[in-house]
């Protein structure tokens, strides 16, 4: 069994319209080992979101491959890809994307319902407790703070026990205190549950919670830092942003 949760091999994604073509990802090869927390950083337009979308099977690459837990995504049909996303991948976005008419517990149970499974109450309760919201199961999103809503979104992403959790600026809409809560939760999921987390962020403090920070510039990997603090990460970003094209 491979010890890698996700492998990206020579991943390339071009967007074409008419005669113009943009290379959002240019032969990116990366490995995300199991039970590790990786942050992806880079200037605006460097390909971070495209990387996450392709790695999570939400977008298809132009060439190269994505392998999740031994399954190569390239060869999968749309139906197979949908099933893989539903069962084996979790995703949290900057916007919490909770359904306002459903309670926290119903929102968390939704991925299981969509998969045609009867959501086990104990599992829903367990995952809400993991994110510290065991006592808010019956609250609707409008009755919860932003940080609590993102924790419900996190519980929803984790309810299927995904092999990898992708986050696209998951703390982007939160103040620094609630960001910290969400980041501590992610860190705890990696350390205690062996969860694999890959998170795009522009915040050096958020990135410093990860084991490793991978930097993208113009769709290419441009170095990485391991175990770095927020100041070193911020300094590295400043250098990248100042670099001439
Ligand atoms: P980041 O997340 O680092 O800001 P993106 O992955 O969103 O970068 O975008 C990388 C490049 O790809 C940018 O030049 C962007 O304009 C382009 N791009 C992203 N999505 C599309 C799309 N759907 N159609 C055309 N160009 C796109």
Image: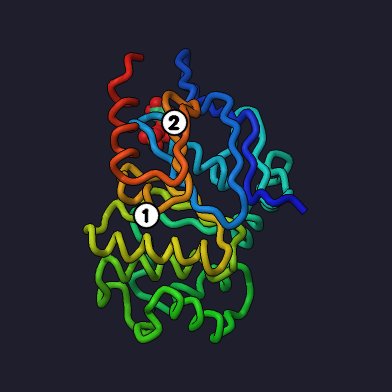
Q: Is residue 165 left or right of residue 87?
A: left
CA gap, disc 1 to disc 2? Answer: 18 Å
Evaluate whether residue 143 shows in this view.
yes
Q: Which residue is mark 2?
A: 216
Q: Position of residue 4 (x, y in %)?
A: 66, 49
Q: Are marks 1 and 2 in contact (CB under 8 Å)?
A: no
- Give the number of marks: 2
> Is ligand 1 closer than 8 angstroms to the Cβ of mark 2?
yes
Structural crowding at the residue carrying mark 1, measured as other residues with C-alpha within 10 Å and reported as few (<14), some (14–19) or many (≥20) = many
Q: Position of residue 107 (x, y in %)?
A: 44, 73
Q: Position of residue 105 (x, y in %)?
A: 44, 79
Where is the N terminus found, in terms of image quarters?
Answer: bottom right
Find ligand 1 in the image and state its quadrant: top left
Query: Which residue is pictured at 23% across the width and 58% down the height?
Result: 176
Q: Which mark is residue 170?
A: 1
Structural crowding at the residue carrying mark 2, measured as other residues with C-alpha within 10 Å and reported as few (<14), some (14–19) or many (≥20) = many
Q: Is residue 103 left or right of residue 32?
A: left
């Amino acid at each position: 069994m491979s010890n890698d949760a996700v492998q990206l091999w020579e991943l390339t994604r071009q967007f074409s319209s008419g005669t113009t073509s943009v290379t959002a990802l240019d032969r990116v090869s990366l490995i995300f080992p199991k039970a590790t927390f990786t942050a992806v950083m880079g200037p605006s337009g460097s390909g971070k979101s495209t990387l996450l979308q392709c790695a999570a099977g939400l977008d298809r690459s132009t060439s190269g491959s994505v392998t999740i837990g031994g399954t190569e995504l390239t060869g999968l049909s749309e139906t197979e890809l949908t099933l893989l996303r539903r069962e084996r991948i979790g995703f949290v976005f900057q916007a919490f994307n909770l359904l306002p008419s459903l309670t926290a517990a119903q929102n968390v149970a939704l991925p299981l319902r969509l998969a045609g499974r009867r959501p086990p109450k104990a599992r829903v309760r367990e995952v809400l407790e993991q994110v510290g919201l065991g006592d808010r199961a019956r609250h609707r999103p409008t009755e919860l703070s932003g940080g609590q809503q993102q924790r419900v979104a996190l519980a929803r992403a984790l309810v299927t026990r995904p092999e990898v959790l992708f986050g696209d600026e998951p703390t982007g809409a939160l103040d620094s205190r609630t960001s910290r809560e969400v980041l501590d939760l992610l860190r705890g999921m990696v350390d205690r549950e062996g969860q694999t987390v890959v998170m795009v962020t522009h915040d050096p403090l958020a990135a410093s919670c990860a084991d490793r920070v991978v930097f993208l510039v113009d769709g290419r990997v441009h170095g990485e830092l391991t175990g770095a603090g927020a100041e070193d990460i911020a300094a590295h970003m400043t250098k990248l942003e100042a670099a001439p094209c």
